Image (tube, rainbow, N blue to C red):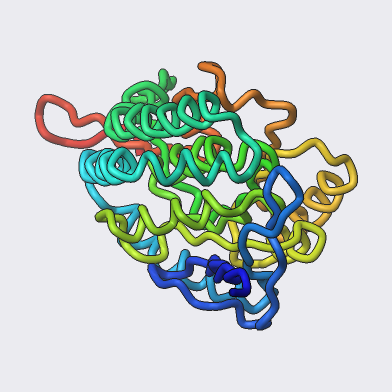
Amino acid sequence: MSSRINVLKTYKIYINGQFPRTESGRTYEVKNSKGEVAANACLSSRKDFRDAQVAARTAFGGWSTRAAFNRGQILYRIAEMLEGRKQQFVEELMIQGSKKIQAENEVELVIDRLIYYSGWCDKYQQIFSSVNPVASSHFNFSALEPMGVVSIIAPQQNALIGLVSLMAPIIAGGNTCVILASETKPLSAVTFAEVLNSSDLPGGVVNILTGKVSELLTHFSNHMDVNAVCYAEDNANDIKLIQENASLNVKRTTFYKNKNWMSEEAQSPYFINDFQEVKTTWHPIENIGGSKSGY
């Protein structure tokens, strides 16, 4: 008998809570640590990015106005769902080159990191907001507001922990996002999208694309309805391109170069603060008699 030919899975992209095939119709081979073809992944196009951006913008209004504790509940639910599929992620990380103990540690850290940020959802405002001293009869308050839609170019090597370490604080702060997963290690990113889809996260809050950084970086950084760009590699040419494109509509740019995503320093409420805007409000102080002064 002839040997059986394995049916390789084609990992789809994740847009607006659904798993479409790429608009371009293109795929590429994902190879394992031995150089063997392990699966197929979508080569996303500019149109895919536009669809993901529209989904993220549409979802932003509802997500940003949710109660902070509810965002925390949803992040915790994502961690719960991931815990139930831990072994699958371990196996995929091993296909992508990790040793078993490394893969187990990474998956457990991803779960813990989601829980960490779920706890910060209703606390970071107290840390970073303030009542400011002013030389007039007013109260002056500074509070944080989410920036909007964030495009994320995830780390190439830390394919799962790096992606989650960027995504979690961004959505914890009320933003929505479009993520470009690792080009060479996309399997766990798309499987993580399946976890998001089965949790309570509304469609469009997180959108995950696969493909080539060289093809998509321009679209991620020059779209006029993207508010911030997050880049987690140290390619000088890529950073220059992002800075130039971001200047077209004054996007916030955040670069995390040479970050060890497995370390404790890779989680902090300051990662939430990196994607917040400060809103300052003045309020007149009422006199005892009820009249307002300070106009």
Q: Which quadrant of the figure contains the C terminus?
A: top left
Nearest the viewer among 59 and 178 is 178
Which residue corresponds to the image point at 78% horizontal and 51% vertical from the top-left? 242
Q: Which quadrant of the figure contains the N terminus?
A: bottom right
Where does the image place residue 269, in percent across and percent down from the top left? 44, 25
Residue at the extreme front: 1
Where does the image place residue 139, in percent across and percent down from the top left? 32, 28
Where does the image place residue 83, in percent across and percent down from the top left? 31, 38
Q: Evaluate whether residue 97 shows in this view.
A: yes
Residue at the extreme left: 289
Give the vertical position of 102 relative to 177 (above or below).
above
Count the marks: how many? 0
Which residue corresponds to the image point at 26% horizontal and 40% vertical from the top-left? 80
Q: Evaluate whether residue 10 shows in this view.
A: no
Residue at the extreme right: 237
Q: Quadrant of residue 43?
A: bottom right
Which residue corresponds to the image point at 25% horizontal and 51% vertical from the top-left? 66
Which residue corresponds to the image point at 42% horizontal and 25% vertical from the top-left? 128
Horizontal side, residue 260 vs residue 195: left or right: right
Horizontal side, residue 98 vs residue 270: left or right: right
Q: Quadrant of residue 61?
A: bottom left
Give the vertical position of 213 relative to 68 (above or below).
below
Nearest the viewer among 131 and 273 is 273
Nearest the viewer among 134 and 48 is 48
Where does the image place residue 271, in percent across and percent down from the top left? 52, 31
